Every structure is written in C-alpha cells, then in structure tokens.
Amino acid sequence: MYQQQQQNQQHQPILTEEDLVSTVLADLKRNVREYATAATESTCPDIRQMFTKLMNSTLTLQGQLFEAMKQQNMYNTSSPALRQDLDKQAKSYQQTQQKTQQFLQQKLGQQQNQSMYTPNGQHAFNQHQGNQPHYM
C-alpha cells in the first residue's frame, strides 16, 4: 500500500501547468519592467535602443502568453473599469506630465541663461547642442 502511494506521488507534478505558466507570465512582466528601467537609465543611445527592442519583444511574448492563457481559462481578467475612473486617472497623468514639462523647461531655461566663469576672464553661456537627447 505504501509503495503504491509513493508511486502515485512520484507521477503527480508539484506545480500544475497553470501555476507554471502563471510563473512564466509573472517573469515576463518583471523583465519588461527591468528592460524599461535599463532603457531609461542608459546614457548610450545604442544600449538604450537594445533595451527598448528587448522590452518590445518581451511585451509581444507576454501578450501572446496572456492570450493563450485566457483562451484556456487560465487567467481571469479583472472587472471592467468605469470610464469615469479611467478618464479621471488619465487627466491626473496628463497634469503630472504638464507639470514635469514646465519644470524641465524652467530648469533648462535657467541653465541656458546662467553664465559660467572661464579662466581667461570671459563669460560663456551653457547651451545645449542641437536636439540631441539627454539621458540620466
């Protein structure tokens, strides 16, 4: 009897297929966040582009896995959000974006108007060259 129970336990997977797929989906979501962070923190345009491509391909894979899970009833979507709530949140994000842009314009404008002392006694203005992107 004990041997039969032991044999049955050996053939039963520890995690179900749904648990395994859910773990992969969670890892893909985490990878997208990490690639996005790496892209935004890159100072080299080539590295930024590489992480952006990785993020986009991972997003595609994550979407495909999500759709497959949804078709197999392995993923329960949340209840639909009220349009009013979505509009309120979108407005809040737009206001934050506007404030951020105003702040940056103000700070960049101040930098361009400030002069820097040079060793030969002349003043030079700190100006940005062209429209090159600046990364942190």
Image: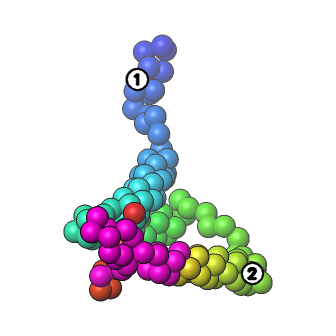
Identified by mark 1, the residue type is: Gln
Disc 1 from disc 2: Cα separation = 57 Å
Residue 35 visible in image: no
Residue 56 in percent (x, y) is at 35, 71
Quadrant placement of the C terminus: bottom left
- What secondary structure is marked by label 2? helix
Residue 20 visible in image: yes
Residue 26 in percent (x, y) is at 48, 53
Q: Earlier in the sequence, mark 1 or mark 2?
A: 1
Which residue in the structure is indicated by mark 1? 7
Instruction: Name the residue located 47 percent from the left edge and 66 percent from the top edge.
Output: 66
Instruction: Classify 10 Å Cα crowding around label 1: few (below 14), some (14-19), many (20 and above).
Output: few
- What secondary structure is marked by label 1? helix
Depth order, front residue of 14/66 = 66
Residue 30 in percent (x, y) is at 45, 54
Instruction: Classify 10 Å Cα crowding around label 2: few (below 14), some (14-19), many (20 and above).
Output: few
Depth order, front residue of 63/106 = 106
Q: Is residue 65 left or right of residue 104?
A: left
Instruction: Point out the frontmost of discs 1 and 2.
Output: 2
Residue 131 in percent (x, y) is at 32, 85
Marks 1/2 in contact by CB < 8 Å: the verdict is: no
For residue 100, what is the image quadrant?
Answer: bottom right
Instruction: Name the residue located 43 percent from the left edge and 36 percent from the top edge.
Output: 13
Q: Is residue 41 left or right of residue 54?
A: right
Which residue in the structure is indicated by mark 2? 88
Q: Is residue 6 above or below residue 87?
A: above
| Region in magenta | 107-129
Instruction: Name the residue located 42 percent from the left edge and 15 percent from the top edge.
Output: 3
